[in-house]
Amino acid sequence: MNHPNVPVMLYDGDCGFCQKWIKKWDKITIGKVVYLPYQEHLGSYPQITKKACQEAVQLIMPDKTVYSGAHAALKALSLAGKYKILLWKYEHIPLFGPFCEFVYRQIARHRTNLSGKKCGLDQ
């Protein structure tokens, strides 16, 4: 599946927690980002590994730039004109980006507990 002019976010389609958040983000970004489960679409993005998708969402921009984890989430939301200040802080304020990634990793590591369903990290 090719989306040449729209950023694509790959997420864990087997994770209930991920599905819940992707639904929320999709309502916020309204067509500015295409959300696809990596389990079905990873083959279309050879620059992205399965391991990377199991650990974090991956945002692929039309120019093939890839953002991962918290950076990907904030970038996607900013494309819709939402939360731009958070992306700016992530990219410009020392320690804010690493703090966001730390929080993202903690949530990602415990998402099975949060969703009650096995996720990509469990496989």
Image: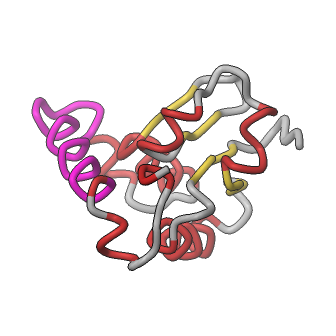
Which corner quadrant of the image does residue 34 belong to?
Answer: bottom right
Q: Which residues are magenta?
A: 90-108
Residue ID at (78%, 33%)? 43
Q: Which residue is drawn at the image coordinates 39% and 40% (left, top)?
A: 71
Task: Kindly give the residue lying farthest to the left in the view shown.
Answer: 95
Left or right: 113 with respect to 66? left
Q: Residue at x 61, y 75 (%)?
A: 27
Q: Is residue 78 left or right of residue 89?
A: right
> Relative to 111, does residue 65 appear above or below in the rendering?
above
Residue placed at 35% from the left, 46% from the top? 70
Can you give x and y, in whole percent of width and height, for residue 6 in the image? 76, 44
Dominant SS type (magenta): helix
Q: Is residue 103 above or below residue 54?
A: below
Is residue 44 or residue 94 the one in the foreground?
44
Query: Is 14 situated above or below 61?
Result: below
8 is within the stretch colored magenta: no
Give the position of the N terminus as an image quadrant: top right
Q: Is residue 92 magenta?
A: yes
